[in-house]
Every structure is written in structure tokens, then in C-alpha cells.
Amino acid sequence: MSFEVHETASGLAAVTRATDARSVQAALRAHDPELRLVPQADPSGRFRWEVRRYMGENHPAVYVCAWMDEYGNPLELSHQLVDRVKQLDRNTVGAMPDPDELNARMLEDRRRDQERDWQAIVDDHKDRVDDRKRVPLFRGRSLYAARNRVRAAIKTREWKP
């Protein structure tokens, strides 16, 4: 077992147990002895992990899955890959996520994010709208005189908008 030290942006160091390829490979073989963990290089030069099923020398390896996100970016190797393979296994009852449920969850997350953003905007401008916070303006004699002229014109009906 090995450990990795991660440093956060604030400088805090966290020690986690590292997931090495050997432990993931052992977990895959415990699930199915024909599964292999294969590192593959993509065109950008990054490595992604793929799981393939080898069924002998006379048959080509069958692609099972690749460990990457929905945008095609490789993910850090972890035992979640083994859980994903177990979900995809046809011989076991793996709970595959329903696409309609995933879509509804995504729409709900977007709606929640939008409401949070709107609430942040309302909170930022609430004091100005409720007349609790005024913008400091210099109110000199000329502004006072201009307002008095307009008020006088309104009283004598000379001013028409």
C-alpha cells in the first residue's frame, strides 16, 4: 500500500491512500479472471485506462469500458472503475442509470444553480432597491438650485414633461 500527499490551494497537506494499477487489476481479476486493465495513450498524449476482456489467443480482446468523464478527459485511476465494470457486466444485476433519470437530475441541477445565481444577484442589489443604501453623490448649491427651479416651475404649471 502506498500513500500520496496532496497539497490544497490554501497550503493544507492531505495524505490519502494511493490507488495503484496493481490493486485495481487484482479487484478486476477477482470479479472476472479474463478482465485486464490496459493503459492507452490518446492523441493528445494523455493516458487513459481501459478495461478489456481477453478470451484466449485466437480471439481479439473485447473492449469493456474506458475510465474517462463524459467529455473524454481521462480520470484518475480509482476503484470506482471496478464498480463501473460491475455495472456493465451482463452476468450480474448491475443498476445502470436510466437516461431519463440522469437527464431529469441534470435539469434539476441546472435549475437549482440558476435559482442560486438569481438569489445572489437579488442579495447583491437588495439594499439599493429597498432604499437602504444610497450612492453617495455630492449635493452642492447648484444641484439644490436646479431642483428648486424645477419645483417652482411645476407649481406654476410652466413645466410640462
Image (cartoon, rainbow, N blue to C red):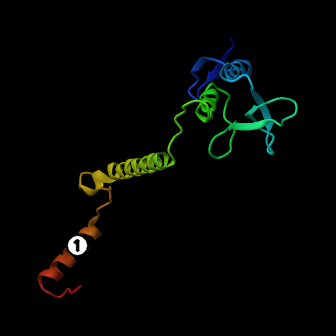
Query: Percent x, y for residue 159?
Result: 20, 85
- Judge left or right: residue 84 versus residue 34: left
* Among the 4 quarters of the image, the one containing residue 47: top right
Name the residue tied to disc 1: 147
Q: Which is nearer the eye, 142 or 20? A: 20
Residue 131's place in the image compared with 146, above or below, is: above
| Residue displayed at 83% across by 29% down | 56
Q: Residue at x 22, y 72 (%)?
A: 147
The image shows residue 89 at horizontal and vertical percentages of: 62, 33
Q: Tell me the kind of residue under disc 1.
A: Arg
Q: Tell me the residue at 25%/74% (across/down).
A: 146
Q: Is residue 53 left or right of residue 82?
A: right
Give the residue at x 63% y 27%: 82
The N terminus sits in image quarter: top right
Toward the top, the furthest residue is 1
**Residue nearer the viewer, 102 or 16:** 102
Residue 6 position in % (x across, y down)? 63, 22
* Left or right of residue 139: residue 69: right
Q: Nearer the viewer, residue 142 or 114?
A: 114
Q: Is residue 160 above or below residue 146?
A: below
**Extreme residue in the right direction:** 58
Helix, strand or loop at mark 1: helix
Quarter of the image containing the C terminus?
Answer: bottom left
Q: Position of residue 64 (x, y in %)?
A: 70, 36
